[in-house]
Amino acid sequence: MYRRDGVSFRWFEGGVTNLCHNALDRHVAAGRAGQAALVYVNERGDRRVLTYGQLLHEVRRLAAALRGLGVRKGDRVTLYMPTCPEAIALMLACVRIGAIHSVVFAGFGAGALADRVRASGSKLVVTSDVTFRKGARVPLKGIVDEALRQVPGGVEHVVVLERSADGAALEPGRDLRWDQFLATGEGQSSDVEPMEANEPAYILATSGTTARPKLAVHTHGGYQVGIHSVGRWCFGLKPEDVWWSTSDIGWVVGHSYIVYAPLLAGCTTVAYEGALDFPDPTTPWRMVEELRVTGIFTSPTAVRLLMKYGEEPALRYDRSSLERVVCAGEVLNPPAWEWLQKRVLEDRVPVLDHWWQTETGGPVIGNPYGIAQLPIKPGSAGIPLPGMEVGVLTPEGEPCAGERGILVLRRPFPSLTPTLWGEPERYARDYWQRIPGHEVYFSGDAAQVDEDGYVWFAGRADEVIKIAAHRIGTIEVETAFLKHPAVAEAGVVGRPDEVRGEVISAFVVLKQGHEPSPELRQALVDVVRRELGPVAVVGEVNFVSMLPKTRSGKIMRRVLRSVILDRDPGDITTIEDEGSVEEARAAWRRLQSELASR
Ligand code: AMP
């Protein structure tokens, strides 16, 4: 079923399929046109429901319009749009005609967008005039104009979905309003383009923070089979589900588990545009009650955000429709797991962590809930899912039996990205040739496997802290901080220390109702010492109101490290809030002067 030739591999070679056909047409042909396919909700309380029949109709109109604009099989289309029905329909329409979409998270700025447009070689960019976040209107079209000034030539058209009364300024000859775009579809075919299984369905920049984005490629065949199978095995996706992935279409989770896998499985998928705690932290729980959500896919950063407000907002709503909550993106620290599992869900349904990357397309390690739920070990991502062969090696390629090392994937599986767009050598070098003499996929994550085969992640391999020859994962230290009831979030890094090599430098966000104090600082140091032993030497605890995070919610420890080393933070185009860097810097300086004045 698959052919491997060194680092390149192909799945279902010669097979013909189309991801959009199986996500929509197949269900409509089976008589399910009337079932809700997509429920869209936003933070302003708007709601729209599209059935499979209606979504297919929209996708057909957009497919014809794309063809009317001259977009053909293999052409790239950049989508810089919020998570809204038009954007989702457009993703499916691109895939339908064999065009390759490249969704850029609508929170990125002009520089990051320009890099991604350039790397993808898109001829069309689709955007909306505005998106809404935390009650504010964020203009998007102006950012597109600014980005395209940095990428002269190449992009032929910009299509604008007008969502506000003011609209956006259009450049004659280049820009089209949504109705003008749809009109180009007149007389055009909206039929499905037959695609060979290994042809790309989409490309998506990885969350890597190098200036030159890496565009992971996902295919019509392997990706489709991979996310569908693993969606059933790991999440138990079934047609009766009302499935809510709280992610955004700008991330791979949004691609695989808001859009493609739930539709392939015939579920009702929920797409939410906005912040989870806006207008207040009851929002997600109200949605669960009103939509009778059966499954949630969320992230540790979202869990910790809600945990900051306590469980009371959740307990006000009926959560009885929920069958499981799955979580990925970072380690789900045991205190956060316990809060959700025990306090919010009252142990009625499982909260399941699972591990993957943009490049893997779908989960690799998890709890195979859809086949047989295994005991949950809080803090572990679970076991390798069917078909996944993982290993833990030293950087030199020695096996680490029971010890911490670098997680590697020993062979390809259908949803694994088979190449980076336009950069096969970079793909080989960065993933398959990192460990000399071993042709294994290098994940970059530090992990260890316990006697039951459960995988425990410790953070990125290059972020492990080395104190007096002991190696401590950033995750275990952060988890120890979270054991203190006042702590909402913690980000830790190693700070060079003459005696011990490194000591822990921590940045801590407190829960509502707690204030920084020297006593609290000491209490936190004590908790870490109690949890991890005397080897875990905490150099300092900095109190901040937010941590530097990527826009997908991952703590940016390299930025914290730049703060304590007083270095330039490097490329921070993917950061959520630049103010977090200044705040960390101010907290660090304040602490230094406090210590100096003692
Ligand atoms: P992305 O490509 O943006 O999805 O990020 C992938 C990275 O997120 C992985 O390499 C891990 O560092 C981290 N990650 C994702 N899921 C988990 C998890 N369940 N536990 C620990 N780390 C995770």
Image (cartoon, rainbow, N blue to C red):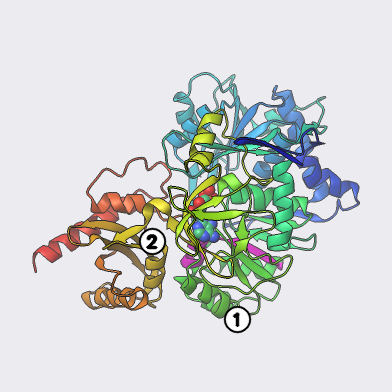
Distance of mark 1 from mark 2, alpha carbons? 29 Å
Q: Does the magenta stretch include residue 10?
A: no
Mark closer to the observer (1, 2): 2
Residue drawn at (33%, 77%) of the image: 527
Residue drawn at (60%, 42%) of the image: 163
Using the image, determine if residue 139 lies above or below residue 478.
Answer: above
Earlier residue among tags 1 and 2: 1
Using the image, determine if residue 210 lies above or below residue 488.
Answer: above
Where disc 1 sits, the SS reads loop
The magenta-colored residue range is: 292-305
Q: Quadrant of the C terminus?
A: bottom left
Image location of residue 265, percent across then percent down: 77, 54
The quarter holding residue 523 reads bottom left
The quarter holding residue 157 reads top right
Image location of residue 330, percent across then percent down: 49, 59
The quarter holding residue 60 reads top right
Quickly name the residue at label 1: 346
Quickly name the residue at label 2: 474
Q: Is residue 184 visible?
A: no
Report the side of 285 relative to 393 (left or right): right
Image location of residue 244, percent across then percent down: 66, 60
Callout 2 environment at 10 Å: few (<14), some (14 to 19), or many (20+)? many
Q: Can residue 130 be seen in this view?
A: yes
Asked whether 388 or 492 is in front, the reply is 388
